[in-house]
Amino acid sequence: MTESLPIIDHPAAAARFVDDGARTGWHDQALWFVRVKRDRQAHGLPEWEALREQAAAIKSHTISRLADYLEQFEREATRRGAVVHWARDAEQHNAIVLEILRRHGARKVAKSKSMLTEECHLNPFLQRHGIEVVDTDLGEWIVQLRNEPPSHIVLPAIHIKKEEVGELFHRVLGTEAGATDPKYLVEAARTRLREVFLAADAGITGVNFGVAESGGIVVCTNEGNADLGVSLGKLHIACMGIEKLIPRCGDLGVFLRLLGRSATGQPITSYSSHFHGPIRDGELHIVLLDNGRSEILASDDFRRALHCIRCGACMNTCPVYRRSGGHSYGATVPGPIGSILNPARDAEKYSTLPFACSLCASCSDVCPVGINLHEQLLIWRERIAARGILSGTKRLAMKFASHLLRRPALFAFAGALARWGLRHLPRFAFYHALNPWGRQRELPIPPRRSFRQEYRKRHERQPPRG
Amino acid sequence: MSASLPADKNARQSILERIRSRELPPRELPPLFDEGIRYADRWAQFQEVLSSVGGQFLSVADRDGVAATLAKLPVVESSRCRACTVPDLHFGNLDLNAVDDPRDLAGLDLAIFPGQFAVSENGAVWVTDESIRHRAALFIAQHLLLVVRQPDCVDNMHQAYQRLAFGERGYGLFISGPSKTADIEQSLVIGAHGPRSLTVVAVP
Amino acid sequence: MPRVALFVPCYIDQFYPDVAWATLEVLERHGVRAKVPEMPTCCGQPMANTGCVNEARPLAEQFVEVLGRFDHVVCPSGSCTAMVRQHYEHLLHGRTDYVALRNKTWELTEYLLDVLRIDPPRSPFPYRVGLHQSCHGLRELRLGSSSETVGPRFSKAQKLLESMQGIQLVKLTRPDECCGFGGTFAVQEEAISCRMGLDRIHDHEQAGTEVLTANDMSCLMHLDGLLRRDRRPIRVLHIAQILAGRTPN
Ligand code: SF4
């Protein structure tokens, strides 16, 4: 699927974000706080690394036999009274959801957090068709009211300050002007959203895990909003990526232990609901979505990205994400995993994302399902270079450097020239707009002689043995 | 646009075919994980975690004292509209079975339900809607109180799933603490949409 | 007597010759006379990390051909060592001589501790030292335990430094966050790169670091560039320089 241009310019968006130094620090600190909470939980379990390995092994296995498991899941879910739908892409997915809602005459929907429906742009689609959708996760609701996408997959409003929420709620809910106390603001949201739940005709949720063996789906929230959305009415639509499957109920133990701890540093989310079939006298529809996943599955290099359980830990730990904000990635899923998944969708549009990374590998160490994130980012760089969508200057520079570095004499000469220049030429020869290194940094103080020059000299006097 | 049909019938077929078109190296399914952490005192650990996630814990030593102890709890004392499905406890003044539309539960102050078992490692209680006609009551009540029998406490989630079977239709969930959110500047607020408090009572 | 080569990375050769000299001295002190061949000058990492494998490959080949003839290859850089050990596989798949090289290429601190098994030095270094855990050494070579992973805590660099006389290793709030160098990342994402570096520096300032050290001079080049621009008092020294007895200033 190709998405619309423009091409995402991460460095430019990131520079704009960093420009507000205080806010960048605040954003970084807020996410680091979550990372620290995660560490505390992880280090509290001696079996943590074994759990990660188990999770990775389960996912690898499931993906190696995904078609079988999907069929089994469909069979078991159907046996327990759910209706399973299949969607190849976002368009089909949205059409299915709309059709189900229409058949029930539903006009108001309470939706809980689902990155998949964000990926499909379900909200605007339903709204265009006269259906009112309210995102009932508080963070999602805040960004929905602000008319912007979430900036994080678990903490959708992490980029927004309480003063801004206060202003927004003042406008929308009539809370006191200037009120910023989170407790007070949450209470106001609670009051309004409870009205939404009571008035909704249907509930839409995402799916954290689907169990092939039992046809069940598991949905995790802290607020209880998914359950409120689907237990007051009779219609539950669950939107699920085909990679969300796991084989056995017993495997849920592994994943629920990892998810809450990795996501927010909680030992488990407040509510982990297991649905097997619909509510009494109601309907449960499960929409299975591919939308490019089977393509990723076919790639040896990127297959493991399908392990992702959307915990957000790689974002919280990513030093670049924390300082550039989720919106700088211009995609539903930002951060390290987003920088892998988005280019798979549109390599040209998202060509800067795999480079928005210092290759520190913290993401790979934090990922609860053992995705080799930083290695995959490196592979993406290669693909982008191979497809010729690497920026011209970058390619030229690398060709030139490679040429130089292969030839010691030439390299020595170029180095000598540069060092001479650094010592003798005026500052502006090196510190100017075309040298991003020197904008905030000094260049190294050049020595008179390079190591090899000096080494050669010393060894001429005293020829080395061997 | 409004006439757009839902997925073509072939979506299922084509997705499965596309997945199968690529032969993947076989990966073995590892046996179920059972190296989970264990605790010397499960209930003590449970209590510690539960309180860290904003819940309250209470253990009642003798069977006859349960009702009297519960009656003195502030959440019980201060609630007007109560539903209770725990056998032998008669705190309810609203019969869930007599309510047809769960939306009528909006005024429910306190729900007292049985929990099947507790999990030490994360302060969670497994609850099903077997005895609860409207599962919405679990979430719409202002306060929730779960009663668990003292022998029913496991160390970790692996043991928890060993106890669970999902043979038929049904609904169940782990509840760990009250409804909460940290969506405004990461400051934790208890009582997001669901219950403002959770009390877990262990009884003989 | 094993034949040992010291690989001197391109930027150390040109800008930080003393790091190479210091490494030679440290090795010599422990009975190893390492040789520095004219070639290779670079492991190919800048190109490989930019996705330009075709440009990186000839350098990797050169590396294998020349240094493959030695019994050990030592490198005062975790990043270059990681390039050889973790990433040549992908670059040179099919070459058998590479596998042998992989198993005999060492980063300096692991060479000292794991191959030479030296006793950590007791020479004086009476300064407050901030240890920067360079990412590739940490998370690719596992020269220490990263803060993300659960298991026994260790750090080879710390082990070498901590018994020096008078040294005080400072405690950072973020023990192993990236400095933001990242090769071409440093210029391509200049804004983020510098912010990351400044945040690290801030952490070191809070902790009272006088001398900032690391296994990788590239991280230090970036941090030193930021430090000198603002005329901040922290000094940088490569860990080889500290072990060789250099002092700041
Ligand atoms: S890639 Fe790993 S760390 Fe990142 S969101 Fe997915 S599961 Fe979590």
Image (tube, coloured by chain):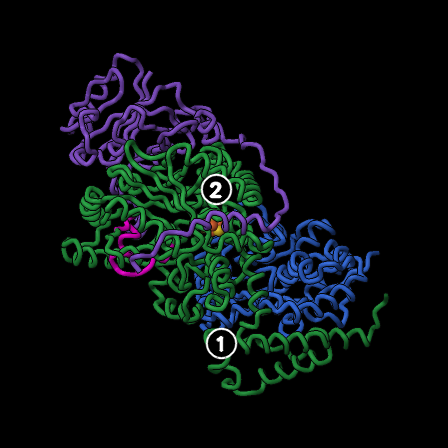
Chain colours: A green, B purple, C blue
The disc at residue A436 is 1
Q: What is the quadrant of residue C199 in the picture? A: bottom left
Q: Range of the magenta residues? A: A134-152
**Most extreme residue toward the bottom, as rendered?**
A425
Q: Nearer the viewer, mark 1 or mark 2?
A: 2
A303 magenta-colored: no
Q: Position of residue B167 (x, y in %)?
A: 43, 27
Q: Residue at x 26, y 44 (%)?
A: A104
In the rendered image, the quadrant that contains the C terminus of chain A is bottom right
Q: Residue at x 51, y 84 (%)?
A: A427
Q: CA distance from mark 1 to mark 2?
A: 46 Å
Mark 1 and mark 2 residues within 8 Å of each other at the beta carbon: no
A144 magenta-colored: yes
Q: Position of residue A102 (x, y in %)?
A: 27, 48
Instruction: Write down the chain letter for disc 2.
Output: A
Q: Foreground: C61 or A120?
A: A120
Look at the numbered disc 2 and give the secondary structure of its residue: strand
Horizontally, residue C82 falls left or right of residue A254, namely right
The disc at residue A245 is 2
| Disc 1 residue type (three-letter) | Pro
Q: Earlier in the sequence, mark 1 or mark 2?
A: 2
Q: Foreground: B58 or A349?
A: A349
